[in-house]
Amino acid sequence: SVDVAVPCLVFANILDHFEPAEHARWWLLPAWWGGFTLLALLLTLVLARFGRRETRREFAAGLFFQNAIFVPLVIITEAFGRNSALLPELFIFTLLFPALFFGGAHLFFGHAGQPIRWARVFNPVTVATLLGVGAALVGAREWFPRFAFTTISMVGDTSAPLLMLVLGDSLVLLYLGWE
């Protein structure tokens, strides 16, 4: 779901609903996210000290890696519909979140000296966001084949149910003590 359906959702929403001419300062959205992330890092460094020693890493990771895409995605689609113009803004705002999440989780759970795994930094969600913004900037919407766009959009529409199934499955396995 994260490697196929979510990138399709991101690409289709940006290509269909992002109008660079109407959002002249769209490029500021990732900068605002960067500021928010620095604030989250500061709060994590301060508040992690209050977590129990045996779960401090998990506590800190939970504080720092807030669910920046999926929870707002569900709220926006439920409140404003799946064709809301807020979705492309969310994806552009969180442009660097997947790269940070997939590329930086080892700082909490692995060895800090590990080499950067570029496949995690340039993951499918980040690449889909960049491709979607690039396509919208050059006006590719007009010449993009409708059947291809419809297929990508339909696959993207499966992302929320798939994520809920995966999340539910993971919670059940955690509750039962299976890994």
Image (cartoon, rainbow, N blue to C red):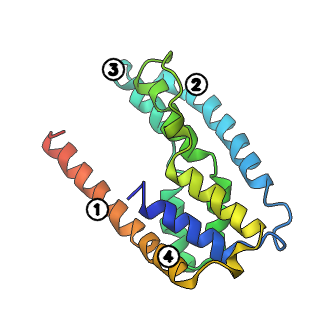
Residue under the point 76% across and 46% down? 31
Asked which quadrant contains residue 64, the reply is top right
The CA span between labels 4 and 3 is: 44 Å
Amino acid carrying label 4: it is Ser
Amino acid carrying label 1: it is Leu
Front residue of 140 and 178: 140
Amino acid carrying label 2: it is Leu
- Observer able to see residue 51: no
Label 3 sits on residue: 54
Front residue of 79 and 20: 20
The CA span between labels 1 and 2 is: 33 Å
Residue 2 image offset from top left, x and y in percent = 42, 55
The CA span between labels 2 and 4 is: 40 Å
Instruction: Please tell me whether mark 2 sits on a helix, a strand or a loop.
Output: helix
The CA span between labels 2 and 3 is: 16 Å
Label 2 sits on residue: 45
Q: Earlier in the sequence, mark 2 or mark 4?
A: 2
